[in-house]
Image (cartoon, helix red, strand yellow):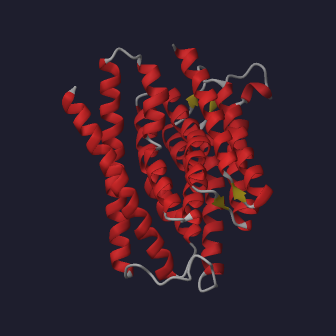
């Protein structure tokens, strides 16, 4: 167990250092390409930090563990908003741009509503069992393609426009910036793997159940890249990069982490899944929209409320398991 604890510590070091390198590199890419940090957060950082969730989901569906796949996606999305944005806004109130309030966050909520609707077959036909079919996965992927089209359109629209995130000169030349992003992602992903794997071993050796480990360690562990990146971005005042990462990650999680494996490998069942998670998923999305839309800022008080809801939610699900 001592070795596992040491590797766990190394994992956290890699996460923290990797997040710093990733944020610096991504921010520098934005300035080199004359595009907003929000766009980089929605694309480069989102796809990079979403790799752990995708790996867990593919492994879960191949092994027939649909509960792990659903728990990974829905749990990660809840954690991204309530825990990660909560902590980030407590560190520093987060400024939110109009485009994020009126376009990106609503798209995140819409794909969440789509997932909840496709999941609840029994609401439309009592005789049906709640499953997400291969055709449902294709529908989710098609929605994600709409999001990709939107990203392409804003790349064309914003390139060369004045933006308050582009006032400073690039910190590094473009090649070095890309190298930093790749290196940062490698550190973050390796660190998250070290943390998840060894935390699971430690928890199991202490006698915790596999289900409890999955609900807590795996769900939080696969969100560690987003957490580390967001905390680093918050400290560096990179609010657009932070929000782009979180909103983009939530869309990516449903569109690719869930939609892609289901479209390829087939249907998954949610027979043992809790509706509480779906409700909290939607509540967290609307809470983000309301918080951001009120004063174009997520304040420290709103961050504290998010954290309190997260604690109550996790106390409920862990209490049910124990």
Residue 79 rendering spot, x and y as whole percentages: 56, 40
- At x 40%, y 57%, the residue is 19
| Residue 65 in view (yes/no) | no
Q: Is residue 72 above or below residue 101?
A: above
> Number of callouts in the render?
0
Nearer to me, 193 or 301: 301
Residue 128 rendering spot, x and y as whole percentages: 72, 22
Residue 59 rendering spot, x and y as whole percentages: 40, 36
- At x 59%, y 49%, the residue is 90
- At x 45%, y 27%, the residue is 214
The picture quadrant where one finds residue 35 is bottom right
The picture quadrant where one finds residue 76 is top right
- At x 56%, y 46%, the residue is 87
Residue 62 rendering spot, x and y as whole percentages: 42, 33
Q: Residue 32 vs residue 296: left or right?
A: left
Q: Residue 231 vs residue 202: left or right?
A: right
| Residue 240 in view (yes/no) | yes
Q: Residue 102 vs residue 210: left or right?
A: right
The picture quadrant where one finds residue 58 is top left
Check the picture and name the quadrant holding the N terminus.
Answer: top left
Q: Is residue 57 above or below residue 239?
A: above
Nearer to me, 128 or 110: 110
Q: Residue 6 vs residue 52: left or right?
A: left
Nearer to me, 200 or 306: 306
């Amino acid at each position: 167990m001592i070795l596992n604890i040491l590797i766990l510590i190394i994992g956290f070091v890699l996460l923290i250092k990797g997040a710093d390198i990733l944020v610096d590199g991504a921010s520098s890419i934005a300035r080199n390409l004359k595009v907003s940090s929000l766009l980089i957060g929605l694309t480069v950082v989102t796809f990079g930090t979403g790799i752990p969730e995708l790996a867990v989901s593919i492994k879960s569906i191949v092994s027939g563990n649909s509960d792990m796949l659903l728990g990974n996606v829905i749990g990660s999305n809840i954690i991204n908003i309530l825990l990660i944005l909560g902590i980030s806004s407590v560190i520093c109130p987060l400024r939110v741009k109009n485009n994020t309030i009126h376009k990106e966050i609503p798209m995140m909520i819409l794909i969440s509503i789509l997932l909840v609707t496709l999941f609840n077959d029994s609401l439309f036909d009592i005789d049906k069992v709640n499953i997400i079919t291969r055709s449902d996965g294709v529908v989710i992927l098609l929605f994600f393609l709409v999001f990709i089209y939107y990203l392409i359109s804003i790349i064309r629209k914003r390139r060369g426009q004045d933006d308050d995130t582009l006032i400073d000169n690039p910190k590094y030349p473009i090649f070095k910036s890309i190298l930093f992003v790749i290196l940062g992602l490698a550190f973050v992903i390796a660190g998250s793997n070290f943390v998840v794997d060894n935390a699971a071993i430690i928890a199991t050796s202490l006698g915790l159940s596999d289900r409890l480990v999955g609900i807590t360690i795996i769900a939080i562990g696969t969100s560690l890249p987003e957490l580390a990146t967001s905390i680093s971005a918050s400290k560096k005042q990179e609010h657009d990069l932070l929000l782009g990462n979180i909103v983009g990650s939530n869309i990516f999680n449903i569109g690719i982490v869930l939609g892609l494996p289901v479209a390829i490998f087939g249907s998954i069942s949610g027979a043992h899944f809790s509706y509480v998670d779906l409700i909290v998923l939607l509540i967290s999305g609307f809470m983000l929209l309301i918080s951001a839309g009120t004063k174009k800022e997520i304040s420290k008080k709103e961050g504290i409320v998010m954290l309190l809801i997260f604690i109550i939610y996790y106390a409920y699900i862990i209490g049910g398991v124990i």
